[in-house]
Amino acid sequence: MKTLFEKIYDREIQADIIHHDAICCAFRDISPKAPTHILIIPRKPIPRIGDASTADQEILGHLLLTAGKIARELGIDQTGFRTVINHGPHGGETVPHLHVHLLGGRQLTWPPG
Ligand code: 5GP
C-alpha cells in the first residue's frame, strides 16, 4: 500500500507541488510552521532517516541539494532557513515516509522545542 507521501508524489492526492523530478518532489506543508514550510520527499518510500542505507546515499544527497535549490528559488537563502528531519516519537515524526522540512521566512528559535 502506498504511503500518503507516495500518493502526493504520484499526484493521486492534491498538494501544492513546487518541484518534481525522478528522485524527489517538494510541496507546501498543509499546516505550515513558518511563512515558508516545504516538505521534500524521496520517491522511494524510505520510512525515516535511521532506516536509510548506504544504497540511499544519492537520494539523501539529492534531497539536501534540492532543499538548497528551493531555498534560493524562494529567496530565503539570504535571510536564512532551517532543514529538519524528524525520526520517531521523540523526534516528532508523524508521517512514516522520509521528508526534509525546509523552514524559513521568520526568525527561528534555538534550541527547538
Ligand atoms: P513530521 O511530523 O512527520 O516530521 O512531518 C509531517 C508533516 O507533514 C507535518 O508538518 C504535516 O503538517 C505534514 N502533512 C501531513 N499530512 C499532509 C498532507 O496531506 N499534505 C501536506 N501538504 N502536508 C501534510
Image (cartoon, rainbow, N blue to C red):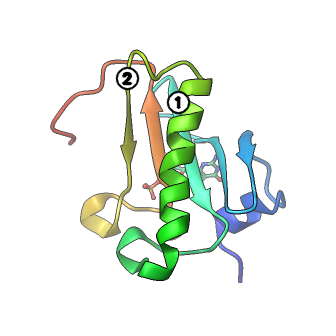
Q: CA distance from mark 1 to mark 2?
A: 9 Å
Report crowding for label 1: few under 14, some 14 to 19, many 20 or more residues within 10 A (C-alpha). many
Left or right: 33, with 3 as reference point: left
Relative to 93, say whether 33 is above or below: above
Please name the residue shown 57% across and 50% down the image: 40
Give the quadrant of residue 33: top left
User: x and y percent of residue 52 in the render?
Assistant: 43, 77
Q: Residue at x 52, y 47 (%)?
A: 65
Q: What is the crowding at mark 2: few (fewer than 14 residues within 10 Å), some, or many (at least 20)?
A: some
Determine which of the numbered discs, if any, sits on residue 71 in the image. Answer: 1
Residue found 75% across the figure and 61% down from its top: 22
Amino acid of disc 1: Ala
Residue 39 appears in view: yes
From what the image shows, is residue 93 above or below residue 69? Answer: below
What residue type is disc 2 on?
Answer: Gly
* Residue 25 in the image: above or below residue 49: above
Tell me if residue 53 can be seen: no
**Above or below: residue 54 compared with residue 64:** below
Tag 2 residue? 80
The numbered mark at residue 83 is none
The percent coordinates of residue 30 (x first, y second) are 60, 41
* Quarter of the image that includes the N terminus: bottom right
Residue placed at 44% from the left, 34% from the top? 103
Instruction: Please state which of residues 57 and 18 is positioned toward the viewer in this rendering.
Output: 57
Task: Compare residues 22 and 38 and report the one nearer the observer.
Answer: 22
Looking at the image, is mark 1 or mark 2 earlier in the sequence? Answer: 1
- As helix, strand or loop, the secondary structure at mark 1 comes to helix
Asked if ligand 1 lies within 8 A of label 1, the reply is no
Left or right position of 100 against 26: left
Q: Nearer the viewer, residue 3 or 105?
A: 105
